[in-house]
Amino acid sequence: MITYVDAGEAMRERVGREWGEVAARHMHLRDGFSIVALDGGELMGLIAIVWRELPPPLAATEAYIDIIEVAAAHRRHGIASELIQLSAARAREQRAYQLRAWSSSDKSEALALWRALGFGLHPATTFSGGVAVEGFFVTRAV
């Protein structure tokens, strides 16, 4: 049975050991929140949200998904959907205006998931280490 729990510092350290420092570095504990999916103690999934203030004249906060990961062997079992739904509920509780993320265009399964969950997609290019990466910002009002 999969359980979804708020992550603390000990879980961040575990994520770093099991999934690498990049995943651990993207977790938010003070300026947002992170939720992990566990099955019998096995790490199955992770989502990390950071609160961001939208620029004037909007005067609103958004919940930005800094990272969402599901272990490869456990994808397509609803874990990512549940992590996103739990995060959207938390964003509503905090009166955030929207839930937003970015996904590269090569992640066709992720893009299909965003669409299925009612997110709008907007083409965008980001630059990672000076290299252009094509993708989409995905956004849904909460």
Image (cartoon, helix red, strand yellow):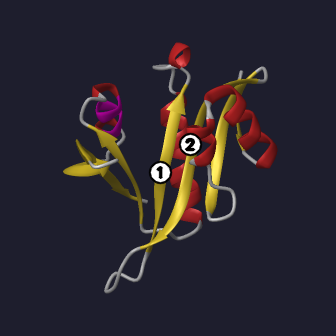
Please indicate whether residue 58 sits to the left or right of residue 65 in the image: left
Count of residue discs: 2
Kind of residue at badge 1 = Ile
**Vertical side of 23 occupied by 25: above or below:** below
Q: Secondary structure at mark 1?
A: strand
Furthest residue in direction bottom, as rendered: 57
**Viewer-side residue, 88 vs 111:** 111
Label located before the other in sequence (2 or 1): 2
Q: Residue at x 58, y 39 (%)?
A: 23
Query: What is the quadrant of residue 62 in the picture?
Result: bottom left
Task: Specify the segment rendered in magenta.
Answer: 110-114
Q: Position of residue 83 (x, y in %)?
A: 55, 39
- Residue 3 visible in this rendered orientation of the protein: no
Residue drawn at x 63%, y 42% is: 24
Q: Amino acid at mark 2?
A: Ile
Q: Position of residue 1 (x, y in %)?
A: 71, 21
Per the image, label 2 sits on a secondary structure element best described as: strand
Instruction: Tell me the residue at 64%/48% (across/down).
Output: 34
Residue indicated by mark 2:
47
Badge 1 is on which residue?
65
2 and 1 marks in contact (CB < 8 Å): yes
Report the quarter where the C terminus lies. bottom left
Residue 96 appears in the picture as rendered = yes
Where residue 95 appears, as percent x and y from the top left, is: 52, 71
Above or below residue 15? Residue 62 is below
Using a 10 Å C-alpha cutoff, classify the residue at mark 1 as few (fewer than 14 neighbours), some (14 to 19) or many (20 or more). many
- Disc number at residue 80? none
Distance in Å between CA atoms under marks 2 and 1: 7 Å
User: Main structural element of the magenta stretch: helix, strand or loop?
Assistant: helix
Residue 81 drawn in magenta? no
